[in-house]
Image (cartoon, rainbow, N blue to C red):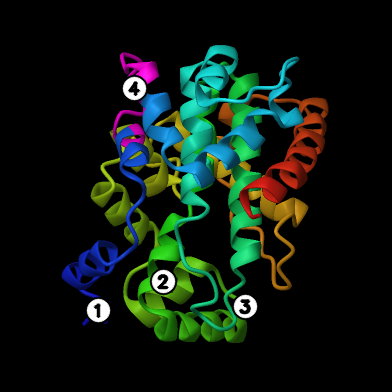
Amino acid sequence: MSMFSSERLAQGVQDLPSLPAVVMELLSNLEQENVDISVLAKKVSYDQALTAKTLRLANSSSYGLQVKVATIQQAITFLGFQTTRNLITAAAVTGCFPNGRCPGFNDKAFWRHSIATAACSRSLARRLRFNQDVAFTAGLLHDIGRLVLVSGHPQAYGEVLAWRRKHNGEWLDAERAILGVDHVEAGVALAEHWNFSDTMRQAIAYHHAPGTPGAGFLAAIVHVANAVVHALDLAGEEDELVPALSSVAWDAMGLNEEAYLDLFRETEQQLEEMSAILMA
């Protein structure tokens, strides 16, 4: 019998800290554009820490603005609504979870990996003419279920870490062996609790299995980005393993060697600047 029932997993999700209401609103309307921008800017401005982090991101070289933006309204004007919404979400989510709950779990490495996967997903999406902002958010949140498990059950997740070291195995195998559930299931549970769009839920659910019928192209982008970031060892984890790569997803990208080398450089450059801002 599974150690973690679906009810216990759902309860763990319920007990997590809530995101700011304006961010919850943004996540649930990720693919909508008919939002009152002035109302959004006003709501975000009430949270000074969130505003400051969002504006530092907007002014980073990753977004290449020729002018310095000083307000959320200006960020929306120069970057567009979707990109600004994306930055607000990133600024909020990276500050939402408590650190240091589980001895042996490297919170810094987790976020470096997530931010790098977000940057890589965005770069891939640009080359493939896919929505870059949706790809960035999916890349950032693809492993969020690990934080659900770590935050809610730190002692049990310590056993997951020990099992993985002993067997030199994948995270999914270690989580299932000890907990009876894995971070994909936990991520989907959180996506439902936080009212993510169906597209985002699909990407989280299938980023390890992008060849599954109905998985969607976004899952393939995140899958490849995740593998690239592991292969480049950008998180700085001692026991970095490159997960199995789906040939279906890799072939779907249709990129040549030169394009991938550019992608690698771009991801590495953006990671350092963005992680400095988001993990401050």
**Amino acid type of disc 3?**
Asn
Q: Is residue 35 magenta?
A: yes
Element at label 4: helix
In the image: residue 229, left or right of residue 11:
right
- State the separation of the CA atoms marked 1 and 4: 46 Å
Q: Which residue is mark 3?
A: 168
Mark 1 touching mark 4, by CB under 8 A? no
- State the separation of the CA atoms marked 3 and 2: 23 Å
Which dot marks residue 188? none
Q: Which residue is mark 2?
A: 151
Residue 263 position, x and y percent, is 75, 32
Task: Please provide the residue range marked out in magenta.
Answer: 26-39
**Amino acid type of disc 2?**
Ser
Mark 1 touching mark 3, by CB under 8 A? no
**Amino acid type of disc 1?**
Ser
Q: Which residue is mark 4?
A: 39
Disc 3 or 4, which lies upstream in sequence?
Answer: 4
Residue 44 position, x and y percent, is 42, 34
Q: Which residue is mark 1?
A: 2
Element at label 1: loop
Report the mark closest to the observer, 1 or 2: 2
In the image: residue 9, left or right of residue 84:
left
- State the separation of the CA atoms marked 1 and 3: 22 Å
Report the mark closest to the observer, 3 or 4: 4
Figure check: 14 above or below 218: below
Figure check: 22 above or below 39: below
Residue 220 shows in this picture = no
Instruction: Name the residue located 24 percent from the left edge and 62 percent from the top edge.
Output: 14
- State the separation of the CA atoms marked 2 and 4: 33 Å
